[in-house]
Each structure stands twice: as structure tokens, then as C-alpha cells.
Image (cartoon, grey):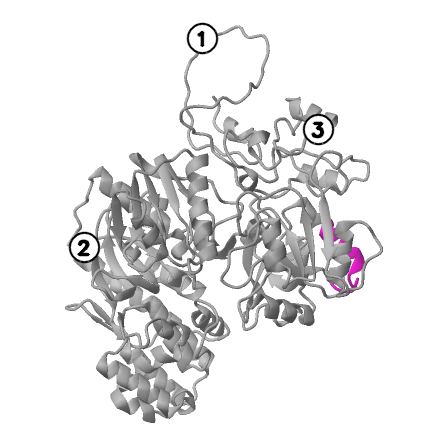
Amino acid sequence: MFPGSATDRLAPLAHIDTLQCSQVAIKHEKSFMIVESQHQAERHTLISPDCTICKDCLLELFDPQDRRYHYPFINCTNCGPRFTIIQDIPYDRANTTMASFQMCPDCQQEYRDPSNRRFHAQPDACARCGPQVSFSTHPAILRQSSTTDSIEQAAAQLAQGAVLALKGLGGYHLACNALDEGAVQRLRQRKQREAKPFALMVATLEVAQQFCQISAEEATLLQSHRRPIVLLRQYPEAQVAPGVAPGHQTLGIMLPYTPLHYVLFEKCRRLFDARQPVILVMTSGNRSDEPIAYQDEDARERLGPISDGMLAHNREIFIRCDDSIVRQTTAGPQILRRSRGYVPEPLNLPWSISTPILACGAQLKNTFCLAKERQAFVSHHIGDLENLETLLAFKAGIAHFQRIFDITPQVVVHDLHPDYLSTHYALELDLPLIGVQHHHAHIASVMIEHGLTEPVIGVAADGSGYGPDGAIWGGEILVADLCTFQRRFHLTYMPLPGGEQAIRQPWRMAGAYLYAAYGTDFERLTIPFTQQMKRTAWKTLEQMIERKLNCPATSSLGRLCDAVAALLGLRSEVQYEGQAAIELEQLAATNPTIAHPYPFELLAQTGEIDVLPMIRTIVDDLSHKMPVAQIAQRFHLTIAHLLANACNEVREQSGLQKVALSGGIFQNRLIVEELVRILHTQSFAVYLNQKVPANDGGLSLGQLAIAAAQLRGEKAVLHT
């Protein structure tokens, strides 16, 4: 075999994991054939993710002479639906939601011809024999279109300012004209989504470049066959409706990935205002905190009150799958949500496991993970396990993965938090249990991605995770391997006044930090934050802290970000998780000058990181009316420096050179880029999540890695 010859001839969606060569005896066969799939005792077939329409199908889609001209379900072996339509394996048409569509003679001929690119393409179809679209509107709401073309009707309604429900690959979207503020606000009100940014879809890279700065790496992500939503820095003069991404300097943009999307944009281009580009809001089809709608009857019930009309089709979606979200940083690409286009590709373990394992993940941004032998299958994005619908989706997803990958778990892994619904599910399974600490799992997710089995310095930073001491952790410097960990540094514990209420109301954490820094004198500080708050609220907060009433201890860096955001007047209450920290980052990014870090202390004897010197200096800056953008930038710089200094202290004690960074804080571009820069200048080898999210969406992989290592009995000795 010549070097590179195998990869040079790969099919567009194929990749090689390993190459094995063996000699076989000549059998003197006279023809090549593919025989019907056989049901095997054990299943090893992998399933492709859903992927975007390929270039060949796209050419045919817009060729008036082609028999599939404008057919919105065109596909071949190189593109189209996979994961979301598969009901069982082997991957044959009879085991997909295409089973009810009998191929016409022309499609059947393509399907059986080895020289045709539709040879054994299971979703193959055309307008004569395949799925069809339909469009319906609520009577008397909008002006009806005279055309009978369903997609053109939908385009005409979008041009009028309608909010539509559109059925895609993994579920429904809610769509409207992103340049129409009235339409955007109607969508926000109906969806009950007050502030969280909406995702957008544009027809081409060139249109996206009219609204955002796009690097070569970001262009590659946008145009990849996975077609994720890519977070891009928008131009200040970008004319999208203000309600699309209020308070944000970034837009989440994706390109079309189904032929239906492409045909819709073609129709919109002819019906919209020719002086403006076509850019559509394309957000998940759900109400806030609910899973995405993917079944037609459920979509009509839940999305009917939100939308003015529905563009649907009669190809069933078997498993829901949200859009994936990624972004490019100077430290490399980051996946913020791993779902359509990526799932269910397996991740390789560094060793084979003898016991099949189920890891149940976290409460927020939940995914689960199943593994056997050397393959770990991290699920699609499930969401926050806070209601019955999402919990049922979690359970149904596990059952589906067990079936299609033939994995019957013998061990179940869970987070230590006793109130997580994923933990409750694990306890109900009557299987051997392994409990894994939240932040250890974060670090393990990075280690297993990069094949690291030796001890590392782990920086785990997020909003909250249950600590073995019963406190709420979230700003941790660990020494960890895949079996055990030791906590070396952490942010000094602070009270969390009101528990969960403090997460929704960042002003409480700001008050807690001020109380710690100034005692009862904090009420007399001459800064806008203290002057604008009601005295009764301060008194209640003070009494809660003094009496330790509903004030669990926390070392969370996420809560520190909340406190600083509240001090700067950005956000006293939040509508979605992480909003205050996100807005603080957005503000810091607007500061044109390079600041220097605030003071802090590393207390080596207690392992605490004391940030009260920083809080006092921030208060001084506010008293002197320092620009809040400059304060926000200095804060981010300070976080990067204190984490780097803590890593240096641990290296002095342990000799470890490798640093793994994980947790939701490392979705903050300013912190991650500055921290990685500093660590590299100090000769550390730095590892980050790139295949799974750094947030809790990657936690299930880390849980599974720890359980697998512990079951192997290879507990490494930690350096001291």
C-alpha cells in the first residue's frame, strides 16, 4: 500500500481510524456483489451523523433539466439524513422512517447500480415516490398566497413578517425575517424567550460576511459537512433586528444544510426586499426550557400558539437532534453544543473496556454516554433536566442508543449531586453504581479526548458542582488522573445567599462579596450598585449571611463573574443561565486598551485563592468613575493570571507540566485565550476540550472515562 493512497480515495464522509492488512486466499469469484444485511448476535455497525447536502446533489437541485429539480429531499450516499431517521440496525431502508416510501423504478435502478452515487443510499427518493412538503397557516391571520407551491407560500408569509414553524432534520425550527424587528419581538414574546440570542441562517458565506467578521477557520467551520451554528463577531453597523441578540457583539450563524432550506432561500430571495440580503432567524422549535419539537402532532400543539404557519413534511423524525454550536478561538475550535452533524460519531478510548458502561451526565446541558470495547458514544444534546418532557427525552435517548449500538450497560455512573434527576435515574436502574465528582469529570473529559492517562494539573471552573465536603465547588485547581484527584487550590468559600435564588439574582452574590470585603460598612459605599438597592433587601441579605440561613458555601468562579457583573450595573437578575457572565465578557471585549490584573492572593497553606483584594480595588475604580469596560477587561485578565499562578504553585509542588482546562467558564473567549497564552509562555502543555463541550455537555464522557479507569484497577499514584 502506498503512503496516503487510502485517504486520497476516501468517500466524502469517510475517515480512517486504523489500517489492518491481512492475506486471504484467492476465491476465484467472478463478480462483485453486496448481499442483504444479516442480523448478527452482536452489532458493530456505526451510524453516520446527519450531514449537509453535497455539491453534486446541490447542482441537481437547481438544474431545471434534472428530475429532482427543487425536490426538497434530494440526497445520496454522500449526504442527507442518517441518525435522525434510523430506528434500528442494520442500516437498511426498512429500519428507517423511509420504510413507508416505496422507491419508483428510476430510484430503484439508481439504488441497485454500484456505479451510481445513490447505490444503497437508504433515504433515496424523488418527487414521484418520496416525502412531500405541506404548508398551512392559521386562517385570517396573514394574507394568503395564490401559489400552490408550499415552500413558496412559506417564503411569502416570511416576507409579510410571519413567524413560521419549519420541520428540519432533527426537529422543528421557528423562523422569521431577522431584519424585521416586529417579527423578532413577536417570536420572543410567544416563545417566552426574553433575552437569549437567536440563531440565524443565511444562504451563503458571502451573505454571512456582510454581517460578521469571518476568519478562514470560521469559514471552514461554517461550510463543513456538519453545518453547525458558528459564533461570529458581528460588525457594529450590522443591520439585523436589535432583538436578535440584545447586548451581544456576536451572532450565531449557520448555512443551509437541507435541500428544503436551499429551496426556501431561493424563494425568499425572489419575494423579499431586493435591496436587503435574506437572513432568517432559525431557532429551536420549542418554548423556553422545553425540548425541541420533532413529532408533527406535538409540534402542532406546542408550536401552533407560537407560529403563524407551519412548513412540514411527511418524513418522520425518529430521534430529535438540535443544531450544534461551535466557535473558533486562538486556542483552537470549541464545541459549545455537540448534536446534529457530530452525533453519534464515537470517541475512541485509550484502551478497551470489558464492562459496558452508561454515564448519565449532569442536570444542565445534559448528555449521556454509553461505551463498549474502545468506543464511547456521547449522546446528542438533551438539555436541562428540569421538566418531565426533557426527562422523558433523556430516557428515550438512552433506550435508543442501547438498541442501535447493542450496549447493555453493566455499570452506571452518576454525578455526586443527590438532587440531579440524572442521579435519580441512575439509582433506579438496579445496577452497580459509580459516583463521580463533577469537576473531576470535567478534567477527565479533556484527558480522554487527548489520550492522557498520567496525572495532570486540572483547572475546573464553572457555575456549580457538588463537592465531597457538601459545598458548591466551581473554581478548582486539581491534580488528577483518570481514577482519583486531589484539590490543591480553590476560590475562597463565599456564602450563596438564598441558594438557587442567588444564581437567578446576581446582586445577591455581589452583596455577599461586599459583605466579606467590608463587613456591615458595605452599605455605605458610594458606588451606584449600593446606592440603587433597597435597604430592606440589604438588611435581609446581611441577616442571612450572619445567621447562615440558606447560605451554602461556594467556591464558584461563575458566581464571582455574576457578582462583578452586578457590581458594574450590568445585570441584577438573569433570564437564562450564564447571562450575567456573558454580558460581562461582551463588555470587556469593547475595551480598546490593554489593562493590568487586579491584586489577589494565593494562600498556599490553606489552598485558597483570595479575590477580596480585587473586589476592593474594583469598588475603588467604581468610586473614581473608571470606565466599566476597562474594569471588566481587568477582571478577565485577573482571572487568567490567578489561575496561571495557581498552576505554577502546583507545578512547584508536583513537577507536573500538563494542564487540562474544562468547565463552563472556558466558554469565555477572553479568559481561555489569555490563560492559554500565559501558560504557553510559562512552558506548560495545555489541553482543552475540542470534541465535546467544556460545559456540562461534556461531563458524561468524563464520568465514563473515570469509571472505565477505576474498573481497570489502574489507579495511578498522584504526585505530592
Measured in 3D between alpha carbons, the distance from the residue under mark 3 to the one under mark 2, in whole angstroms, is: 65 Å
Task: List x then y, in percent, for residue 305.
Answer: 63, 63
Can you identify the residue that label 2 sits on? Answer: 654
Mark closer to the observer (1, 3): 3
- Tag 2: amino acid: Ser
Q: Quick check: 6 above or below 32?
A: below
Per the image, label 3 sits on a secondary structure element best described as: helix
Mark 2 or mark 1: whose residue is earlier in sequence = 1
* Badge 2 density bin: few <14, some 14–19, many ≥20, Cα 10 Å: some
Mark closer to the observer (2, 1): 1
Task: List x then y, in percent, for residue 588.
Answer: 46, 73
Can you identify the residue that label 3 sits on? Answer: 107
Res. 268 in view: no
Check residue 37 for magenta coloring. Answer: no
Per the image, label 2 sits on a secondary structure element best described as: helix
Task: List x then y, in percent, for residue 395.
Answer: 42, 47
State which region is magenta. 263-276
Task: List x then y, in percent, for residue 677.
Answer: 38, 60
Measured in 3D between alpha carbons, the distance from the residue under mark 1 to the one under mark 3, in whole angstroms, is: 37 Å
Can you identify the residue that label 1 sits on? Answer: 25
Per the image, label 1 sits on a secondary structure element best described as: loop
Classify residue 482 as left or right of residue 96.
Answer: left
Measured in 3D between alpha carbons, the distance from the residue under mark 2 to the one under mark 1, in whole angstroms, is: 56 Å
Mark closer to the observer (3, 2): 3
Mark 1 or mark 3: whose residue is earlier in sequence = 1
Q: Quick check: 211 above or below 600?
A: above
- The residue sitting at 36% across, 75% down in the picture is 502
* Badge 3 density bin: few <14, some 14–19, many ≥20, Cα 10 Å: some
Q: Quick check: 549 above or below 663?
A: below
Q: Quick check: 595 above or below 56?
A: below
